[in-house]
Image: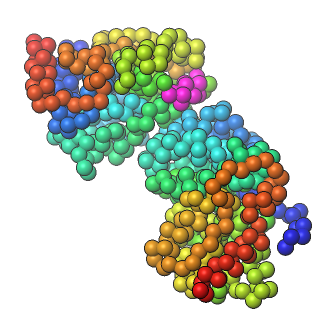
Amino acid sequence: MKRPDIGKLEKDANQLRKDVLTILTKAGSGHTGSSLSCIEIILTIYSYKLRLDPKNPKMENRDRFVLSKGHGCPALYTVLAHFGFFPKKRLSTLRELGSSLQGHPQLGLPGLEASTGSLGQGLSIANGMALAARLDKKDTKVYCLMGDGETNEGQVWEAAMTAAHYKLDNLCAFIDFNKLQIDGFLCDVKNIEPLADKWSSFGWHVIEIDGHDLGQIMDALDEAEKIKKKPVLILAHTVKGKGVSFIENKAEWHGIAPSPEELKKALEELETEKE
Amino acid sequence: MNKKQDRSDWKPTRDGYGKGLVELGKANKDVVVLSADLTSSTRANWFKKEFPDRFFSFGIAEQDMMSTAAGFALSGKIPYCCTFGVFASGRAWDQLRVSVSYMDLNVNIGGSHGGVMVGPDGATHQALEEISLMRVIPNMQVVVPCDILEAEKATIAASVTEGPVYIRLGREKTAVITKETDDFKIGKADTLKEGKDLTIIACGTMVYHALVASESLEKDGIDAGVINLHTIKPIDAKAILEAAGKTGAIVTAEEHLIAGGMGSAVAEIIVREKPVPIEMVGIEDRFGESGSPWGLMEHLGLMPEDIVAAAKKVLKRKRS
């Protein structure tokens, strides 16, 4: 796929940020900090790499994206709406009774590839998709986005060993490395460093980037495609709550939504940033 | 009935599972088999030998295996996950809940070495809770085959049954009760014997014991029907209510904890629709322990004479 224009992608990311904040405020609950940190990652994967047809979400030869950190779904929902998998106005039903936009992703929403939410399971699911594609001799690529706190889960490392054992070079995983989880800084809750070394020693090709730099994300995605006989882990350094000064780097913003007043302030900040 | 039985022609249900997998491998190229380091024990090695490209090894990582199976199913494959029942149902319960059942995927689980008959391995390896743990998950279906032939049929049926199916299998050789030609349908109970005075509803190893108990009761002038409730979920409420209506007393029998097990599932139907006295043969609130398989069955009250005693008790309640 052709490299998207970075200026346009930046504008899209800014708009998606506003959408995420707006729908979270309307819902009155949800994971603000965790959604804002992964917007550039998800947007770039969808804009630059995924072979998809929003009019035919189950297209046989599509690529797959699994959001293992299910709580970041407002970011994914806004991206899916942005690409036309469902009408944008549906976003405002987030977390409502009967909505297809559940608090954590549920299969059935057009474009969504897997139900997730109980952390640690998405990489295994992605491995299964990658193994199935290989068995069918398809050139499907599978992408997976995990949280950094999520790597506390033992299953992540089980899956890391499986992907390396089967040399899944059609799989590319991201970690949204925003350094915060619900209880506080990762280094205080349970230190996971040295994270890059851990993945390397598990047999993965590791690329470290700034997870808000669209050019770096695209470069990493290109590099990932050239790596053979190994799965690729893109360790994306990010800022929790990125883009809104009073939300950034605050653990308490992991799982709460802005009030209408906070939304107003946040949207003002994002308007200024655009200019 | 206490005399030593001739068990020379008995066979384990896990062998039926292994045979079923090989049959499926030949018939359907989308069937894949996943194993968590118990490939020979679960008879998954028979499939592995025939179809090495469609066999996937996970090492001792049941959680990873179950979620990976979900990924396979989301890509159109029909995975069978092989491990011991304790690990399948306990260790990987959340993965079966979220990755598999929440998405209602055609992922099938062969939980071998179910029940106390793993014997000497002791409590950690004796799966006494799978029926409870599995049936409580929405969308999950639960089958406990009574013999090798039924296990093979259940394995094959699971591949064309929408949604996940948990198949409980045994290590030990058990009696072969059914015939090759018998019909098997997931969700449809088999009435093996009609009765007038009470009905024994059993699953797995206890179906044979129910038949032996029924014969013994006949000598005392008691006419006990026997139902093979091989599918615990979806449960055949019609067959259960007919039996309750016709005989007015029920004994349930399972090689499993009473709490939440097959008997509980039967009682959930009966108490709401057609209350009649029920006695339950199963294991009280406790763990297993080391011992010989049949020694443990006796020790834990899972023999035909235990069903006979329960039958006599339930008849007293019926008549009072």
Location of the C terminus of chain B by quadrant is bottom right
Location of the N terminus of chain B by quadrant is bottom right
- Seen at 54% across and 65% down, the residue is B265
The residue stretch that appears in magenta: A153-164
How many numbered markers are drawn? 0
Residue A187 image-quadrant placement: top left
Residue B215 visible at all: yes
Residue at the farthest front position = B320
Q: Is residue B247 above or below residue A253?
A: below
As for residue A240 lying within the magenta part, the answer is no
Residue A89 image-quadrant placement: top left
Residue B117 is situated, as x and y percent measured from the top left of the image, at: 76, 54
Q: Is residue B318 above or below residue A64?
A: below
Q: Is residue A4 above or below residue B299?
A: above
Q: Is residue A95 above or below residue A241?
A: below
Describe residue A22's horizontal placement relative to residue A83 as left or right: left
Residue A76 visible at all: no
Describe residue A195's horizontal placement relative to residue A54 as left or right: right
Q: Nearer the viewer, residue B289 or B87?
A: B289
The scheme the figure's colours follow is rainbow
Residue A199 is situated, as x and y percent measured from the top left of the image, at: 53, 16
- Seen at 77% across and 86% down, the residue is B220
User: What predominant SS class does the magenta segment belong to?
Assistant: helix
Residue B232 image-quadrant placement: bottom right
- Seen at 26% across and 27% down, the residue is A32
Q: Nearer the viewer, residue B66 or A138?
A: B66
Describe residue B220's horizontal placement relative to residue B246 as left or right: right
Residue B87 is situated, as x and y percent measured from the top left of the image, at: 63, 42
Residue B291 is situated, as x and y percent measured from the top left of the image, at: 81, 50
- Seen at 41% across and 31% down, the residue is A68
As for residue A158 lying within the magenta part, the answer is yes
